Amino acid sequence: MRLDGYVRVSRVGGRSGDAFISPGEQKEKVRAWAKAHGHTIAKWHEDLDQPGSKADRPGLIAAMDRIESGKTQGLVVARLDRFGRSVQDSANLLARIRAADGILCTVAESIDTSGYMGKFLADLFAALGELELARIRENWNAARKSAVARGIHVSGKVPTGYRRNAERILEPDPVTAPIVHELFVRRGAEVSWAQLARFLEEKGVITPWDNANWTVASVASLVRNRVYLGEARAGSIVNPDAHEAIVSLAEWNAANRARGVAPGRSGRSTGVLAGILRCGGCSYAMKAKQSRTRHGKEFVEYNCKPDKAGGRCPSPAAVKATVIEPFVTERLFAFAKGAAGETTEEHGDEQRILDAIAAEEAELEAALDGRLAEALGGANSVAFLRTVERRSANLEALREELAEVQSKRAPVELDADLEKVWDDLNVEQRRRVLHSVFDSVFVWRTPERGRNGKFPIARRTRLFLAGEGPPVPRRGQRGTIRTLPLDGPASAVALGEDRREGS
């Protein structure tokens, strides 16, 4: 009988002992079994750094496809828990194998599902495997609780300003702790995030990731961290007196209450013009995407994807963030200097979305923690990558929803010195200001004669002030392709002239 061999290892690196069966050992056991029973191993499938609690493993999916297409008559594994640890998932996979007239065979348990006894044993051992996985998880949670109770900071990175002693307890670093304390004091005095980043760099302080450069987001993350109050935590497990604090509760609150804002993430992959920037060829919103040049340099570009719900864009536009964002913000600053401030009512849904964004950012930050990657089978495992991808998508959707809500709101109070405080605003705050001034910003595809940046951005851009923009497709509504003429009247904000009809 032609059977495929399947090999799975939850985590490869650095493991040994009786509980660990290497990929090579698993293959040898399967080969010996197949030879003894007169079977041929037609193809091997491997899932390395993949947990058995997940059914969507690439190697297993490929093996199932071959069974269901009739290319092979079944699957052989060294041990049943290599096939799966979840009773429900294993039962579903076995049902698919049986429906394709295939079999599952295991070497260690001598299971052959071609008979009723083999199916019973497979179900039994799968249940035991799931029980063992639950025991491992429970032990892991108990170990984390015990570690936090002893004052251990459960993280692979030591927070800036601290060092670990022989008992793995955090203690203030004599060199960097005073600098971190000064950082909190300065933030409490409303020193900007950008200035605080330069302060750390001038003092020669490096990030926990051994980077000498500090960003607004990394400084904000440091200030938000309650570890500086002496807390150790792992998820919902908290020890408030785990180690010596670097700042007092009053200093921590002052730093986090300053200006009433909490900086968001960098927004590099979402773009500050999300929800505002639109393609002149179809009127649909353009999406920001982070890419790399052929030399490996990262950049963000806004693109119009040709296929839309309302049809196909006849002339999809694209523009780099480094070109369009400075162009729009310069017009914003010019408008702010001549505009009278207006205070408006908050949109009812905005706070809900902001709270959801904060929660999703926390979820994404937790997903990027090395411990989750290890629990899901490694940083390159399908389960871990899909978890990060799903949480990133949720965050992106919420940010787009926030942009839509903010676009429907009336102007906010504008400061004539907006340019001076712009660097201190987070991405959501910048979008809020932009949405209060501009209804939309349209960009057209660069004409052939103007490739490589020779065609000025001002010649292919039109800015519409709040309440003056043309009809555009909205989220939740089926839009239609609406091409706007490039040679229409230019925006007053773009040219610095008096506002004209159709701007």
Image (spheres, helix red, strand yellow):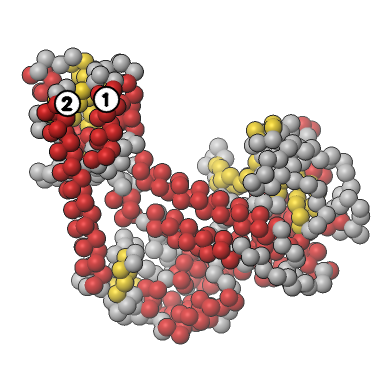
Quarter of the figure with residue 124: top left
* Frontmost residue, 33 versus 351: 351
Q: Verify CB contact (< 8 Å) between mark 2 and mark 1.
A: yes
Q: Residue furthest front?
A: 116
- The answer to whether one can see residue 171 in this image is no
Quarter of the figure with residue 167: bottom left
Q: Secondary structure at mark 2?
A: loop
The answer to whether 51 is drawn above or below residue 163 in the figure is above
Q: Which of the labelled discs sits on residue 58, or is there none?
A: none
Residue appearing at x 30%, y 16% in the figure:
71
Disc 1 residue type (three-letter)? Ile
Badge 2: residue crowd in 10 Å (few <14, some 14–19, many ≥20)? many
Residue appearing at x 61%, y 69% in the figure:
424
Badge 1: residue crowd in 10 Å (few <14, some 14–19, many ≥20)? many
Q: CA distance from mark 2 to mark 1?
A: 9 Å
Residue appearing at x 67%, y 51% in the figure:
275
Residue 392: give x, y in percent of width and height.
49, 50
The answer to whether 296 is drawn above or below residue 138 in the figure is above
- The answer to whether one can see residue 16 in this image is yes
Tell which circle, 2 or 1, labels the residue nearer the N-terminal end: 1
Q: Is residue 443 left or right of residue 171?
A: right
Quarter of the figure with residue 368: bottom left
Q: How many marks?
A: 2
* Frontmost residue, 134 versus 273: 134
Residue 58: give x, y in percent of width and height.
34, 33
Disc 2 residue type (three-letter)? Thr
The answer to whether 130 is drawn above or below residue 28 in the figure is below
The residue labelled by disc 2 is: 113
Indicate the quadrant containing the N terminus: top left, top right, bottom left or bottom right. top left
The residue labelled by disc 1 is: 97
* Frontmost residue, 190 versus 203: 190
